Amino acid sequence: MKLKISKIFPKAIMFIASVCLFICCEWYHAELDHTLNWKAETIVDENEVAATGLSNWFKAEEISDKVFSRMWLKSWKENCPLNRSELRYLKVLHRNEDGKPQRGEMVVNVAIADKVLTIFRQLYTAGYRIERMVLIDNFDADDETSMRANNSSSFNFRFMTGSTTKISKHGLGLAIDINTLYNPYVKQKSDGTWHIEPATGEEYAFNRDNRTDIPYKIDHEDLAYKLFTAAGFECGGDWTSLKDYQHFEIDL
Ligand SMILES: [Zn+2]
């Protein structure tokens, strides 16, 4: 009997020690990974960001089951030909309305994920303000509601107006809208009246050139404009048939 205990005892100690080590490693890993349990729209302490390094706060990940369930039948509709492996979920920090670091999230095409991540990191470092960056699925993939909330977003599957085969740039995750309420889509209709999206952005739609009363205004002096266009995107604010001041898209 004595012999048996002396044989089992060290093994038991080893087993308990291994379990403890495993738990400690998991805990340590979780402590280091600040993007675990990412909840967009929550504020991060400035000191925490400084202490842990900026790289820990900007990541491009595959679309997890959890994220995909949020997108399902909203931004990712049943006739969407894109596989979720062709998309990436971005976790970024952005400076909110008050200049505080805030968690943001965005789904983009895998082909531009790193490029977009770099731009958001540059915008954050420069103190550029983005009020809100959550998945459009939080608004049931309704563009108008998302824009009224001044939400910045990218992927939302849809065909181009009047087409059943041509997918819009947002439907491919190749277009990004920034600070949407203050940088509306503006088009003159054939009867001379104006179509503005969001409708609540009308007061920011006209005579924008010399105006200084438009918050988050995107024009040629704007840093987002400069970074996106330098990276190969075109801005809808430069279009002539209509203006889409919030919109940056890229051809691949
Ligand atoms: Zn757009």
Image (cartoon, rainbow, N blue to C red):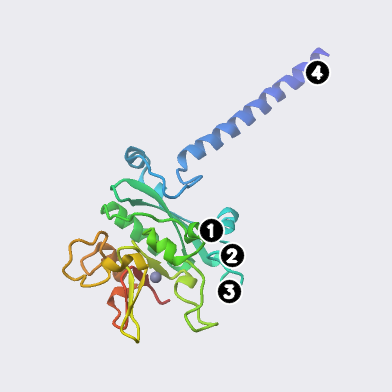
**Sequence order check, earlier mark of 1 and 4:** 4
Label 2 is placed on what type of residue? Answer: Leu
**Sequence order check, earlier mark of 4 and 3:** 4
User: Given contact means CB atoms under 8 Å apart, are the residues at marks 4 and 3 in contact?
Assistant: no
For label 2, the residue is 73
Judging depth in this view, the residue of 65 and 96 nearest the camera is 96
Residue 142 seen in the figure: yes
Label 3 is placed on what type of residue? Answer: Pro
For label 3, the residue is 81
Which class describes the residues within 10 Å of circle 4: few (<14), some (14-19), or many (20+)? few
Q: Nearer the viewer, mark 3 or mark 2?
A: 2
Residue 114 seen in the figure: no
Q: Is residue 145 above or below residue 238?
A: above
Q: Residue at x 37, y 66 (%)?
A: 177
User: Given contact means CB atoms under 8 Å apart, are the residues at marks 1 and 2 in contact?
Assistant: no
In the displayed image of the protein, which residue is found farthest to the top? 2
Q: Taking 6 as reference, is 169 left or right?
A: left
Q: Secondary structure at mark 2?
A: loop
For label 1, the residue is 62
Q: Is residue 35 above or below residue 8?
A: below
Q: Does label 4 point to a residue whose CB lies under 8 Å from ligand 1? A: no
For label 4, the residue is 4
